Amino acid sequence: MRWEAAQIPKVKVAKVDRSKLNKEQSAYIPKIPDIVKCPEHLLPMEQWEDVFLADFSELRALTTAVQENLSQLLGSSVEHSRSSQSIHLPPLPRKPINQPILTAESKDTSASPSSDVSVGESSSNLPLLSTILGMDSVSRVSMLQKRIFVVETADTITRNDYMWLFALCATVDTPLDADTCAALRTLLRKCASLRATKTQLDDQVVMLNILVAISGRYFGQAEN
């Protein structure tokens, strides 16, 4: 028996058909497409981004200071009012509303019943400071993710969507969790893809550049 045991190799190598495994095995990491490039003349200058991000950082610090001062002034009455009175937030539409930017060419048709400008940019649906500061940190993060989810499948980012995204990014607490970082990367890719379809500089390109700078550079979700 000892002689037979000595003849058995200590390591047994099984012959595996790896071609079958490669066909059946799912990808561990999904293939994410690269950020779509746009014409060079539509990209903002690096100096402009530096100045804008400095102003944006100052705005975030200011909103944080305002919220802290309100909490100190009101004290326990703030928590009491939040628990006793419900905060009415604007409803989030399941489908984005087409809200064209009012220009000189559209002044004559802005009063027509088919115009959606008044629907999307009414005072009840604007991201007012009182509305934003009326949310807690969890609500702001949740609203930001929902807003990004809405624009992800939209054909364009309306002015109202832009104002909400800008206001929520200016007040969302840091550090960000993994889901919020993923949502901001989605926003970055969406803005880049929309910007790539443009040929001339307009108001929407400016809005897209601002959102790209915020999500990509300020929150560090850019690839480079």
Image (spheres, rainbow, N blue to C red):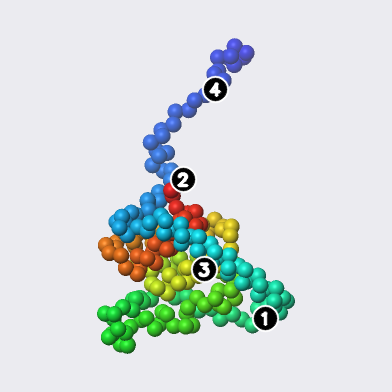
The answer to which of 138 and 196 lies nearer the viewer is 196
Could you tell which of marks 1 and 2 lies nearer the N-terminus?
Answer: 2
Residue at x 65%, y 70% (from the top left corner): 68
Q: Residues within 10 Å of mark 4 (few under 14, many from 20)?
A: few
* CB contact under 8 Å: marks 3 and 2: no
Amino acid carrying mark 2 in the image = Tyr
The answer to which of 208 and 115 lies nearer the viewer is 208
The answer to which of 224 and 185 lies nearer the viewer is 224
Q: Using the numbered discs, state the Cα–Cα distance from disc 3 to disc 4 in whole angstroms.
A: 60 Å
Could you tell which of marks 3 and 1 lies nearer the N-terminus?
Answer: 1
Q: Which residue is mark 4?
A: 11
Question: Which dot marks residue 81?
Answer: 1
* CB contact under 8 Å: marks 4 and 2: no
Q: Which residue is mark 3?
A: 168
Q: Which residue is mark 2?
A: 28
Amino acid carrying mark 4 in the image = Val
Q: Residues within 10 Å of mark 2 (few under 14, many from 20)?
A: few
Could you tell which of marks 1 and 4 lies nearer the N-terminus?
Answer: 4
Residue at x 52%, y 24% (from the top left corner): 12
Relative to 81, residue 191 above or below:
above
* CB contact under 8 Å: marks 1 and 2: no
Amino acid carrying mark 3 in the image = Leu
Q: Residues within 10 Å of mark 3 (few under 14, many from 20)?
A: many
Q: Using the numbered discs, state the Cα–Cα distance from disc 4 to disc 2 in whole angstroms.
A: 29 Å
Q: Quadrant of residue 79?
A: bottom right
Q: Secondary structure at mark 3?
A: helix
Could you tell which of marks 3 and 2 lies nearer the N-terminus?
Answer: 2
Amino acid carrying mark 1 in the image = Ser
The image position of residue 155, as x and y in percent, is: 34, 67
The image position of residue 69, as x and y in percent, is: 66, 72
The label nearer to you, 4 versus 2, is 2
Question: Which dot marks residue 96?
Answer: none
